[in-house]
Amino acid sequence: MKTIFTKASLLATIAAVVMACGGKETKKTEAAATEDAVASKTKQLDIEKPQLTFGFIKLTDMAPLAIAKEKGFFEDEGLFVSVEAQSNWKNVLDRVIDGQLDGSHMLAGQPIAAGAGFGRQAELVTPFSMDLNGNGITVSNDVWSKMKPNVPVGADGKPVHPIKADALKPVITEYKNSGKPFKMGMVFPVSTHNYEIRYWLAAAGIHPGMYTADNVQGQIDAEVLLSVTPPPQMPATLESGTIYGYCVGEPWNQQAVFKGIGVPVVTNYDIWKNNPEKVFVMTKKFVTDNPNTAIAVTKAMIRAGKWLDEPSNRAEAVKILSMSQYVGAPEEVLANSMTGTFEFEKGDKRDMPDFNVFYKYNATYPFYSDGIWFLTQMRRWGQIPETKTTEWYSETIKDIYRPDIWKKAADLLVAEGQIPATDVPETDGFKAATTDFIDGTSYDAKDPIGYINSFSIGNKD
């Protein structure tokens, strides 16, 4: 209805102006031209399935889904979308594969693992990357009190960031010597959180454990025992003493600060600058059967990402996310990271404008190189048990990451004047090699085997 009213209003205005000028032929010509222009901009795709149900986990980075719905971007595309919270990541995966959900907010590693041979197998695709950064590693107050003397202090008397896991190493040794295993949580075996906490620990020479066919817990040779905890349960699990730290997305690091039960020590922006986080996932069958619907969904979510990265919109985004049907966390907790700051120790709030990125830096584009990084980590830690060729990495990811769908959506948005043409990257899907990691290691997605072999801890090929 919005489109119809807009068109009618615009035509009425043009007609009135032309009448005032007194030219009947001019009126007809200009009104027809205006109608054609409006029609070309508002013409919708031929949607195969307009009624859709999408899933999400209660995390800040589900924001593009909430915004696309609340701001009417789905409706603009002729889509009628229900957005439903899910209990855990396994449930999300199973319900998409089984067709109970048409698509979902998902861990970047989930569709990749499903296509690479780890866990439940399925043909899933990713046409849209939901955000960059957004995670943190939090430790209990007790662990922080023991870490803090090992952390350099700046001229302002505050800890120097980023804090490396070197500061944690003596604490782990102390626990070991007293006969206590050091336990930390992450949200899922193929989550960014698992790979980020492993990367952070291993960069300091702390072994986070290996996976094998017989040990799906990933705890072989582990100096830190990592286990799965659903994101909303992280603070309570930390407070109970079941784990001593965790890696999770927002708002569950800031919730620990808010409740006074823990201290975030590092963010994933510092572990891997502008790393990909969540993705939007549908089955290959859904995309094949409903190609225009997939493009329309991607269009709406690109617009949502752009809206979210307008600083003036973040306060409204926080209000929307605080609603019980979305994240349901207090506004002040969500605002701690969503409005360009991040609080470490209580009272140590620092500017971090890129902690949550939804559009800048081509954040919505599903780069092959991002997906290949996850494959290298699956191989490094044994989730992929055997050596693979360089070609296997690129061939595998090209079946899962679908920048072709993203490009069709983006080109339509450019034609409609919704995004500038400069926001569509000219790329083969691979980012340039980067050393933007906490240990300075160089990552080149076109040489995945060389990257895997560059680490002292983990598998070698």
Image (spheres, grey):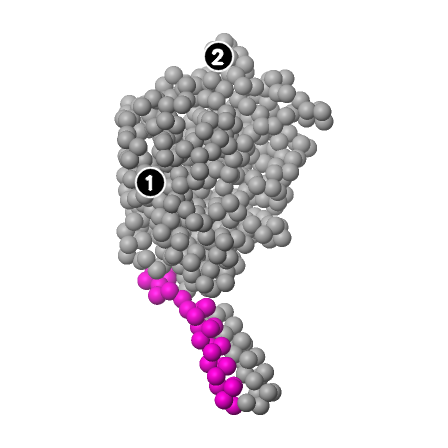
Observer-nearest residue: 165 or 18?
Answer: 18
The percent position of residue 410, horizontal first and vertical second, equals 43, 56
Q: If the image is split into quadrants, where does the C terminus sit?
A: top left
As shown in the figure, which amino acid type bears the numbered disc 1?
Ile
The percent position of residue 135, horizontal first and vertical second, equals 51, 36
The percent position of residue 54, horizontal first and vertical second, equals 40, 51
Residue 34 counted in the magenta span = yes
Asked if residue 133 is positioned above or below residue 96 in the image, the reply reads above
Q: Residue at x 31, y 58 (%)?
A: 290
Residue 407 counted in the magenta span = no
Numbered tag placed on residue 176 in the rendering: 2
Q: Residue most toward the top?
A: 177
> At numbered mark 2, what does the secondary structure look like: helix, strand or loop?
helix
User: Which residue has dot 1 on it?
Assistant: 397
Q: Residue at x 46, y 60 (%)?
A: 414
Q: CA distance from mark 2 to mark 1?
A: 40 Å
Residue range corresponding to the magenta coloring: 24-53
Observer-nearest residue: 444 or 372?
Answer: 444
Observer-nearest residue: 84 or 413?
Answer: 413
